Image (cartoon, rainbow, N blue to C red):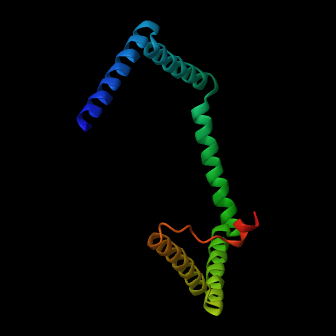
């Protein structure tokens, strides 16, 4: 049975490949796609030669980098950002220590998983009995 299914899949794939080959042979799809890519490359080269796009973009990137360094040097953006992130991290750690947030989350998640497991175990033990109904479903 599995062997027959495999043969059928193989035949289907072979037929699809033959059909695609024939369609391409009649309509020259791959030739048209290749010509389109070639035309696009030629147009990009022509535009670059005419408008000097590549060098202009290089110059813009160089100028932007230089300006960013100048602003950082003047306003110490990188240092201030680093200091701010360190302060925020220290404050988050302090809040966690004070309120034990990670422990509360862990306890809540553990409790939720225990409830799910308990329901699953009860359902598996009593396959013939319907699952417990909630007040929500009985109100509907």
Going 64% across and 77% down the picture, which residue do you hit?
83
Q: Residue furthest left?
A: 3
Foreground: 6 or 86?
6
Q: Is residue 39 left or right of residue 134?
A: left
Would you place residue 25 above or below residue 82 in this image? Answer: above
| Quadrant in the picture for residue 56 | top right
Would you place residue 23 above or below residue 126 in this image? Answer: above
Quadrant where the C terminus sits is bottom right
Foreground: 46 or 88?
88
Foreground: 89 or 110?
110
| Quadrant in the picture for residue 107 | bottom right
Q: Is residue 78 left or right of residue 128?
A: right
Going 60% across and 85% down the picture, which residue do you hit?
104
Q: Position of residue 88 (x, y in %)?
A: 66, 79
Q: Residue furthest right?
A: 139
Q: Is residue 38 left or right of residue 90?
A: left
| Quadrant in the picture for residue 86 | bottom right
Q: Position of residue 66 (x, y in %)?
A: 63, 54
Q: Residue furthest top?
A: 26
Would you place residue 130 above or below residue 61 in this image? Answer: below
Foreground: 138 or 85?
138
């Amino acid at each position: 049975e599995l062997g027959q299914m495999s043969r059928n899949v193989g035949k289907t794939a072979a037929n699809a490949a033959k059909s695609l080959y024939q369609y391409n042979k009649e309509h020259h799809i791959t030739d048209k796609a290749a010509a389109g890519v070639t035309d696009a490359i030629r147009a990009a080269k022509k535009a670059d030669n005419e408008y000097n796009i590549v060098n202009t973009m290089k110059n813009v990137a160089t100028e932007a980098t230089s300006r960013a360094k100048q602003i950082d040097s003047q306003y110490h953006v990188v240092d201030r950002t680093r200091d701010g992130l360190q302060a925020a991290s220290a404050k988050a750690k302090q809040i966690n220590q004070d309120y034990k947030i990670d422990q509360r989350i862990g306890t809540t998640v553990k409790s939720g998983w225990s409830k799910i497991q308990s329901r699953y175990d009860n359902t598996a033990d009593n396959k013939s009995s319907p699952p417990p109904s909630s007040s929500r479903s009985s109100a509907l």
